[in-house]
Amino acid sequence: MKPLKLHKGLAEFQKAKKIIPGGTLGIRRPYNFVEGEYPIYIDSGKGGHITDIDGNKYIDYLCAYGPIILGYREAEVDEAVIKQIRDKGFCFSLTQTLQNRLAEKLISLIPCAEKCVFVKTGSDATTLAVRIARGYTKKTSVLRCGYHGWHDWCVEVKGGIPEKLYEDIYEFKYNDLEAARTLADTHKKDLAAIIVTPLGHPLAHNIEEPAPGFLEGLKELAKRTDAVLIFDEIRTGFRLAMGGAQEYYGVTPDLACFGKALANGYAISAVCGKEPVMNMVEKDVFVSSTFFPNSDSYAAALKTLEIMERDKVLSHIWKKGNTFLDSLRAIIKKYPLRAEVSGIAPLFFITFARDNKKLYKKRRLEFYTQLIRRGIFMQPYHHSYICYRHSSEDLTKTLKAIDDSLRVVTDTIG
Ligand SMILES: Cc1ncc(COP(=O)(O)O)c(C=O)c1O
């Protein structure tokens, strides 16, 4: 299988590097995929498919890094936004009542949600949740587990950030309740919050479900230390269940952050949680932005949630995702590559087990190269998502591409 023709994309990227540092930001840069093999610019998308600016077509499983839960250009959602813009407007000095409708909806769906605040990005939401927790407890230290965004207190790359801005943040590994316990005991007098992704999905590592008692144990730790338990549901929200991972795993935190899939691509995120904690935002904890109250994304979120409930979107995703994962597991077993599939139907990841000779890196590179050449867009270092519009034909075609790609990896690398 030959490499894709990517001339326009590569030429555009050369231009971009002169006007945008690094050509594009962060995880969209080519070295996060397979350089020279993956497209850099998307022209359009529809349903579960995307087309790059050279005209190559792909079945896309990255789903814009998470927001696309229904599909690209979902007509009903886009129409709801266009109607709001055309008939009413969406950016005013005051907000519109759609804000209340959306808060009512989230409160009806999410177990911990008694009150909600809307912001724009996942990083806004996690940063606000931590600020609320610190305001509420009048304490400072925070235990964290998972990626929570690019803000000073939590980002991995520390360039430009004075140490004092993250010196009270302590990290523990997913499912390591003992480590969390030790940290909580050490910092118990000053512990404001424990923030955790309820599903473990660290970059370039297998997805982990919570071990029995892990989430419950964190809840107990937060209770014992008078800290606020925050679930970072930016990825799990509206993917595992309509009430998030907290509904799916049956553990209710004090606060939770939602974003990504909430509006099928429109920029909105939310912090919601128990009333006394959320009430900090009435006076003591400040949050504001010119754009937070805009209702284009409220309209998108309301329509997305309406479609998801009406069309039982999540039960479809779980059903086809489970069938897909069963076949996928059977395929990878055929090859002696130590390939692994982790995750659950709505989000899964194909990785290669680490080995001393570092063959896994070569296998990963070759596997994802073969996949993209076959029109399957998955990220080598990040898990995939299944969206509503991925058809059974898409999934069957993907399984065949995976099978063929693993065969090539076996033949060329072993
Ligand atoms: C679990 C989690 N929290 C927070 C964030 C930050 O969200 P955003 O990129 O919208 O700021 C992300 C983004 O990937 C995430 O996956």
Image (cartoon, helix red, strand yellow):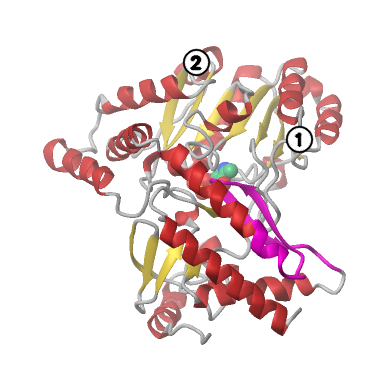
**Please, is residue 348 above or below residue 248 in the view?**
below
Q: Where does label 2 land, which residue?
A: 279
Identify which residue, 247 or 91, lies in the foreground: 247
Q: Residue at x 64, y 23 (%)?
A: 251
- The residue lying furthest to the left in this view is 87
**Mark 2 sits near ligand 1, with its Cβ under 8 Å away:** no
Disc 2 crowd, CA 10 A, few/some/many (<14, 14-19, 20+): some
Number of the label disc, if any, that sits on residue 147: none
- As helix, strand or loop, the secondary structure at mark 1 comes to loop
- Tell me how far mark 1 sits from mark 2, CA to CA: 33 Å
Identify which residue, 414 or 300, lies in the foreground: 414
- The residue lying furthest to the top in this view is 276
Q: Is residue 343 magenta?
A: yes
Identify which residue, 364 or 204, lies in the foreground: 364
Q: Residue at x 54, y 16 (%)?
A: 274
Q: Give the mark nearest the N terminus, 1 or 2.
A: 1
Q: Quadrant of the C terminus?
A: bottom right
Q: Which residues are magenta?
A: 329-355
Q: Which amino acid, mark 2?
A: Asn
**Please, is residue 282 above or below residue 385 in the view?**
above
Q: Is residue 333 magenta?
A: yes
Q: Where does label 1 land, which residue?
A: 211
- Where residue 214 appears, as percent x and y from the top left, is 75, 30
- Where residue 336 appears, as percent x and y from the top left, is 77, 70
Q: Which amino acid, mark 1?
A: Ala
Q: Is residue 412 visible?
A: yes
Q: Is residue 155 visible?
A: no
Quick check: 291 left or right of 379? left
- As helix, strand or loop, the secondary structure at mark 2 comes to helix
Quick check: 95 left or right of 270? left
- The quadrant in which residue 90 appears is top left
Quick check: 2 left or right of 186? left
